Image (tube, helix red, strand yellow):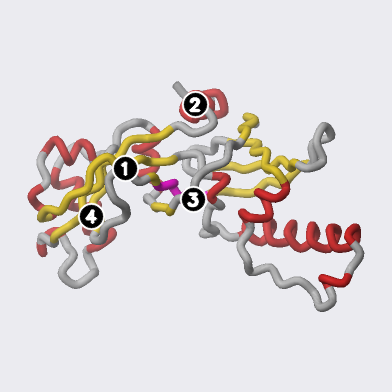
Amino acid sequence: WNFMPMARRPKMNAIKFTPEMLQAILDGRKCQTRRLTQQAGAGDKLYIDERWAYHGREWPLDNPFWRTYNVQYLADGARRRIRLPIATKIAAIKQDIEYPPGFDNLDPNEKERVKDDLQEAWWRKMHERVDAPLPPPFARVVLKITDVHQEQLRAISYKDVVAEGFEGRFEFADYWNSIYGNRPGCAWSDNPVVWVHQFEIVAIDMKWKEAKNEDTGTA
């Protein structure tokens, strides 16, 4: 486990990638993505909503107002111990927890116990769902959009094919069709207008790539 302190972050929207494309980003092989709709504007930041697993939490003895969450990122198996203030942790949880009748009338200690049990159950539920959204405070990869423009899909150059994380146009075309091929007017042969997002990785709170190598033993 690698301890990962968290700083206050501005609110950001999420963007998703397939596991293969996320790995290409982690490896530094991908700095473009083509989408049918605009995901953000130049200068905006997006965090990657990736598959993750929850492995429990701890209460630091040195500070009762913080809690540490054990999180694993499934793309590469890297693990993090993320320390969050209690208030930040509560804000990170989805607002779909149903508190029992009379909860607001409980004494403070009992209310905290009930709240903690319900929130732990929520986290366990998220652990069982492989499609559970990644809470923003747990995001390890943040992208900054450096350029956005529109073009025909098949106008992609060889240079941009490489920037997309592929070795050739046929490989990119096959990948595009695996995602959009069944949508009317969206296949490679349809040559739809797409939004090209150029991005760079923003390192927040830690040098995540170095930490990844320490966790997984990869170079």
Which of the two discs, 2 and 3, sits closer to the camera?
3
Q: Amino acid at mark 4?
A: Trp
Q: Quadrant of the C terminus?
A: top left
Please tell me which of labels 3 and 4 falls first in the chain. 3
Q: CA distance from mark 2 to mark 3?
A: 21 Å
Element at label 3? loop
Which of the two discs, 2 and 4, sits closer to the camera?
2
The residue wearing badge 3 is: 11
Element at label 4? helix
Residue 160's image quarter? top left
Element at label 1? loop
The residue wearing badge 4 is: 176
Element at label 2? loop
Q: Amino acid at mark 1?
A: Gly
List x then y, in percent, for residue 122: 69, 61
Which of the two discs, 1 and 4, sits closer to the camera?
1
Please tell me which of labels 2 and 4 falls first in the chain. 4
Q: Amino acid at mark 2?
A: Lys
Q: Amino acid at mark 3?
A: Lys
Relative horizontal placement of residue 40, taking residue 156 as reference (left or right): right
Query: Which residue is depicted at the point 17% across and 63% down?
Result: 187
Q: CA distance from mark 1 to mark 2?
A: 21 Å
The answer to whether one can see residue 219 in this image is yes
Circle 4 crowding by C-alpha within 10 Å: few under 14, some 14–19, many from 20? some
Q: Which mark is residue 207?
A: 2
List x then y, in percent, for residue 8: 57, 40
Q: Which mark is residue 43?
A: 1
User: Does residue 98 lie above or below 36 as drawn?
Assistant: below
User: Does residue 133 lie above or below 212 as drawn?
Assistant: below
